[in-house]
Amino acid sequence: MRSPWTIIKKPIVTERSMANQQKGVYTFVVDRSANKHEIKWAVEQAFKSNKVKVRHVRTLVVKGKAKRMKNMLLEGRRKDWKKAYVTLKEGRLDII
């Protein structure tokens, strides 16, 4: 199995995600090829010292935005990326 930190790229820290943390929902940028079972396993392994148990995982693929470069002559796109909402049964994560 892969390392938990190759599946979980980084946490998302926004006002909305911080408000969801009060409800026990944490938001992460994850690997595009990871499925819900792998994400659940990675969160439990990465934060094993906090004794977290994951209730369920919701995922979605965020489409990359169209961007203009070189004085608006060239058009390009940012990469698509995958977001995971992880709801915990018990435990708490100290992300910040």
Image (cartoon, rainbow, N blue to C red):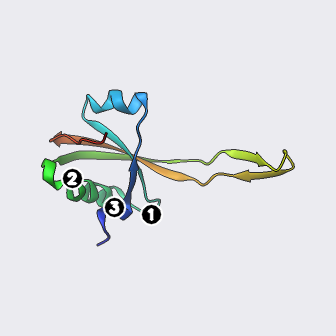
Quadrant of the rendering where the N terminus is positioned: bottom left
Comparing labels 1 and 2, the label whose residue is closer to the camera: 2
- Amino acid type at circle 2 is Phe
> Residue 42, position in %: x, y?
28, 59
Q: Earlier in the sequence, mark 1 or mark 2?
A: 1
Q: Earlier in the sequence, mark 3 or mark 2?
A: 3
- The residue labelled by disc 3 is 5
- In 3D space, how far apart are the residues under numbered discs 1 and 2 (Cα atoms)? 21 Å
Q: State the CA–CA distance, disc 3 to disc 1.
A: 14 Å
Q: Quadrant of the C terminus?
A: top left
The residue identified by callout 1 is 33
Residue denoted by label 2: 47
Q: Residue 9, which numbered label?
A: none
Point 85% across, 45% down: residue: 71
Q: Earlier in the sequence, mark 3 or mark 1?
A: 3
User: Where is residue 20 drawn, in percent x and y?
Assistant: 33, 30
Determine which quarter of the picture holds residue 7: bottom left
